[in-house]
Image: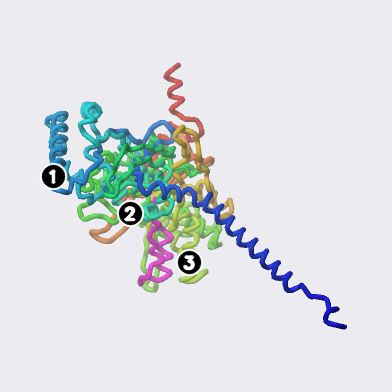
Amino acid sequence: MSNEDTPVNNKPSSVRMNMFFFAAFVIFSILIFRLAFVQFVEGPELTYMETSRNTKDIPLAPVRGPIYDATGEVALAYSEPVQSLYVLLYEDYRNDDRKQEAQELADELAAVFKQFNPGDNEQPDAEEILKRLDLESQKAHGYTPRLVKSDLNMKEIAYFMEKKSEYPGAMVLEENVRKYDPDRVAVQVIGYTREFKGQQDNLDKYREISKSEATERDPGLRYTQQEKVGVDGLEFQYQEELRGRSGYQSIDINLRNLPEGTMQQTPPEKGYSLVSTINKEIQMAAQQAITDELRKLPNAVTGYAVAMEVDTGNVVAMASMPDYDPNDWDYDKIKYVYRNGTMASFPPDDSKKHTESVVLLGSVIKPLSVLIGLKEGLFSTGQTYYDQGYATLGKDGRKVRNSHSAFNGSITARRAIEKSSNAFMIDMVGKGLYNKYGATKGVEVWDEHMKEFGLGVSTGVDLPKEYLGTLEYNSDNDESGLTRLAFASFGQQAKYTTLQLAQYTTMLANKGKRMEPHLVKEIRDAEGNVVKKIKPKVLNEVDFADAYWNEVHKGMVTKVSSFDGFPYDYARKTGTSEQGTGPNKKENGVFIAFAPRDNPKLAIAVVVPEGGFGSVSASPIARKIFDAYDQVYGLDGTPKGKKDQEKDTE
């Protein structure tokens, strides 16, 4: 066949054409995707950057939302509007000629403040006003308005509004000052606010906010250095919800970074409000009860109480006394009391103004010791133990005695709780775990049970800076495993917070559900609409036989005189933990209870460091809290306060 008759093969050129069209399709797809991304994703940011080249947005602090008590009507923290004088510097006052003009302005303003505040030596003088004007722009950019004076009175406001043309750059702006209930309701729970500039290096939350890209793009999220932010308590925990959004003033600037033209203002947005679980009436009863007891006790200077609803986890009272006036902050006066001692740990101070806030539990651990012994099969509910008033430990036969060396004779687990037998706990629980598991594993098993009941782990509370406890039974010391288990069994080997103790008591009451304690039950928007409800949450459950729970509940019947006449059957356990020896020996009062026994509504834990016997120092506080709760909500579901009101109207 001749070459002319050979068919031409076009396959290579077809492949190249297909590849070309495919490549073109990919390129155009990428371009379309990029254009869409720029328009819809990066568009707002690019627009903002473009408009901000010659325009600056100066944040105005938002209006912080209030914090209410459980009724939703009593404001425990709120923002009060005040009028402040700001001055915007339109000129560079760093040269000598302009400095004289600034001095004259400062003299005039000082004279105005003195005129409308005669006899008030706290008014800023001309020298102070010059500092606040920050002529060298050391504290703020040249285009940033300078705060000259806050909280103007009505005469000052009227004067500057009338004389506006005579003071170019002067502006009267509304700001907000954070105020707190003058009755000092749960002040350590509510927390406090401080200027943002002092918190960036101290709190990770604010350091992240100040550096975030979202903050850079959105003026509403931007903080000023002078803006007040939450530092502790609910103020800190719910900072984002409470804060709202900044307003801002938009102004054109020139090449010297100074403002020109008129300023456009976008008002700030009010933050959300919190409805806390704290009931003011119950909280005040708890605070007063602690204060009254501290006056009677020779060595105690602090006291703590937490009241927690069994079914919901609502903390209706959380009292750490003494407290302070958050409207009159003076660190030197309040440095020993501004922290929440119900969930924090701080050592005692030498001046005796404060005692250690976290103490050994003492005998209040015994209901749990018995539960562990029953669960681990170390003894049965009907088994008896002969209590001769002491138990022996070690090869030397060291004796560990009951309180007052009480001889109890033949007792069951139930009676061991009632009689608070140290000997039973050591021989039947501590030694029992040691014999079953050995030293290392025995301590691990004990630790696992403690943490199942919220002792030594976070309670999950919606408050910052929670202390998890001091677990001495896990420490590397010279004590043997047997000794640690023996002393742990009757409450002498670990220190826990009052909040942890309240969660543990709640778990005893509801037979094994570890409820998450919370201090906020609702979050509302500025119009009062509920945007979030905090629902009860079970963190974990333990599976113990009902017979074990019944045995423990029946044992929680120790005689407590402060509850004489109490109209409900209730479960309780007193405790007196000992720390130190000889002249340094300290006895801490501890008390737990829940009521009513058969249908528990409220669990309470009280700790009075160096208060002596828990039955004397701590139980009267719990009684008054139960009574207050009965008045407000009713331990049987019927508020007694309403009944009293009905009787008065008949």
Task: Please give the name of the residue rendered at 38% of the width and 43% of the height, measured from the top-left corner.
Answer: 318
User: Residue 485, how many percent across, how many down?
Assistant: 43, 65
* Label 3 secondary element: helix
Q: Are marks 3 and 2 in contact (CB under 8 Å)?
A: no
Amino acid at pointer 2: Gln
Quick check: 631 left or right of 585? right
The magenta region covers 464-493
Q: Indicate whether residue 482 is drawn in magenta.
A: yes
Which is more N-terminal, label 2 or label 3? Answer: 2
* Label 2 secondary element: loop
Residue on which the image places disc 1: 97
Residue on which the image places disc 3: 444
Asked if residue 435 is positioned above or below residue 506 in the image, the reply reads below
Residue on which the image places disc 2: 200
**Label 3 vs label 2: CA separation?**
40 Å
Quick check: 510 left or right of 286? right
Q: Is residue 362 visible?
A: no
Please identify the quadrant where the N terminus is shown: bottom right
